[in-house]
Amino acid sequence: MSTASNSNGQNGSSLSKSKQEVTESTPAWVPAFLAALEETGVILKAAAAADISRKTVWLRRKNNSEFAQDFDDALRAGALLLEAEAIRRAQDGVVRMKFNPKTGLPYIDPRTGEPYMEHEYSDTLMAILLKRHFPEYREPKGDVNVTSSVHNHLHITESDLKQLQAERQRFLTGEAK
């Protein structure tokens, strides 16, 4: 992934350099972890890149407010990179090879003799992004109460009932009109 832009719009780390420097109270793994978290947005991958356990990260986060803030900033930067990739995929789509579901083999394009490739876009991804940026596309939150009542009243006279019964009998016996 590429590096996120900082608040000045310049490329580079969104975390201040002073917060990433190793000091007596800052373990050596912190800068590597925060940089990897900023690039991936995935705590497990960032911990692996810094060669530490997730437990170490969570303990440091719990006990050090400055690290907790840097952690949140790096995680947000990673999330923004993921959002940028989602926007790219929704707008530009991806090229995918198409396979025959019965054989598992790729379809062959008769014009080229090469495997058939198709450009796909994600309407679902686009809808999610629209809902994120435009609240009016979101479904209303809260309870929805629907009250409905149906009142069917059927009034049949004695003569209408006798006529319906007679028609039913003729139908059952095959004597229908």
Image (tube, grey):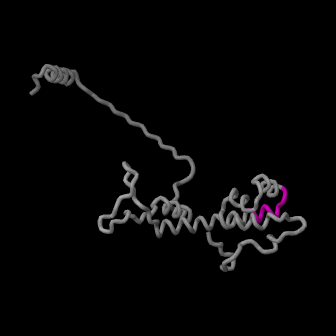
Total number of numbered labels? Answer: 0
Q: Viewer-proximal residue, 54 or 169?
A: 54
Residue 66 lies in magenta, yes or no? yes
Q: Which residues are magenta?
A: 63-71
Q: Viewer-proximal residue, 141 or 3?
A: 3
Taking 97 as reference, is 79 left or right?
A: right
Q: Main secondary structure of the magenta part?
A: helix
Q: Residue at x 69, y 56 (%)?
A: 44
Quadrant of the image containing the C terminus:
top left
Residue 140 lies in magenta, yes or no? no
> x%, y% of residue 145?
51, 44
Q: Residue at x 81, y 54 (%)?
A: 59
> x%, y% of residue 4?
65, 72
Q: Is residue 32 above or below residue 165?
A: below
Q: Residue at x 70, y 58 (%)?
A: 43
- Which quadrant would residue 98 be assigned to in this image? bottom left
- Which quadrant would residue 26 be assigned to in this image? bottom right
> x%, y% of residue 72?
73, 62
